[in-house]
Amino acid sequence: MPLRPRPRDRRPSWRPGRHTLTVLPLALIVVITVVDILSPPTIHLGPLLIVAPAITASFAGARTTALVAVLALAALTVIGALRDGLTTPNHETQLGAQVVVSALIVGLRVLRDRHERELAQVRSVSEAAQRVLLRPLPDRIGQLSLASVYLAAEAEAQVGGDLYAAARTAGGTRLLVGDVRGKGLASLGDAALLLGAFRAAAHLHADLPELAGYLDGSVRWGLAQLDEQARGERLDGEPGRAGRADVNDSGESFITAVILDIPDDGSVIRLIDCGHPPPLLLRADGVTALNAHRPAPPLGLGELAPGGYEVDEFPFLPGDRLLIYTDGVIEARDPKRRFYPLTERVTAWTADRPDALVRHVRRDLLAHAGGRLDDDAAIVAVERLG
């Protein structure tokens, strides 16, 4: 659920539009033309007119750039007619160079416009995929208040391999936060696989270990299907898919996840940690990491846990807050390659409501990483209401 920062100042800020900026190259054409006509015969400022379409291309489209280029050529023609004549070698050379450079500028602007349209389509598709796949968590579900934020590592993507979901059961709420091995759009299919399995089974399995076993089996089956398809495409000679098959051949495809069950009529939280970073419990007296006594292997590697899944239970009282996150948060580095100290930072925000808490973490995390993350990151904050 995207969060909107609070406006600090409601006064409207003036920003020059494209029509306003177009005045600048037009003024340059007029100034250069007048100065060149009034200059001595040995001084030629006409070649400077190419600056006008070059500046226009930085903020306007191809049509406006071409129009300014034509006006600059007309101004150069006027200069030649009023000074040495249109048929002199000097003026013909200037006109020819102006035409060639103007055509190059307009051509590059056309390519840039095409790239911007393609980029807008990619963003539109990724936003649609986010709305379908990673549905926003409700502000309130049962006895819980929720807030979430997703930060994609790839600039053109709005969704990737990190995931979260919530589901109501007969007596409480179940949450899933996970992280697919990999990042960006390449891991989107694995995330969709797990989310679909969770939404289908979260309310059917009364026992949390049974739910975890079902999710692990679904992930293993789905990954096996994808692996078989990827191997077939690699053997058929299709490029771009072999990387997926190579990874899965080594048995390294998995999804780390934390599965939580929060009953409505109790003051506890039940948790199964499948190789995921431990959630943080925030109270007025400090921050506590909910480390599982026996962490389970990531989903997709369930055969490494022959004894099944064990549930850890922790107190979760009214007013307590829980922060669940993916490793993209704690592995974010600053310019000095230092990891983001999440536990230390949230100590100052233990009293914040979930929406303010995730807003603080998001802003502080991006400031720590210089505005760009190397891995996808998801943050979910939960508060038990009174």
Image (tube, grey):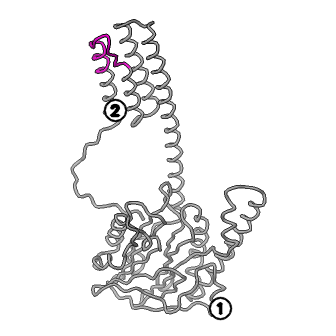
Q: Is residue 133 magenta?
A: no
Give how far across and how far down residue 281 sits, in percent. 37, 84
Residue at figure coordinates x 32%, y 12% from the top left: 42
Give how far across and how far down residue 365 sits, in percent. 37, 68
In the picture, the disc for residue 185 is none
Residue at figure coordinates x 31%, y 61% from the top left: 5
The residue wearing badge 1 is 306
The residue wearing badge 2 is 19
Residue 171 is left or right of residue 81, and the answer is: right
Segment tinted magenta in the rendering = 30-46
Q: What amino acid is labelled 1 in the image? A: Pro
* Whether residue 152 is situated above or below residue 194 in the rendered picture: above
Q: Nearer the viewer, residue 71 or 246?
A: 246
Give the residue furthest to the right.
Answer: 236
Q: Do callouts 1 and 2 mark residues in contact (Cβ within 8 Å)?
A: no
- In front: mark 1 or mark 2? 1
Q: What amino acid is labelled 2 in the image? A: His
Point out the image quarter for the C terminus. Answer: bottom left
Q: Nearer the viewer, residue 70 or 313?
A: 70
Q: Secondary structure at mark 1?
A: loop
Label located before the other in sequence (1 or 2): 2
Point out the image quarter for the N terminus. Answer: bottom left
Q: Secondary structure at mark 2?
A: helix
- For the question of whether residue 44 can be seen, the reply is yes
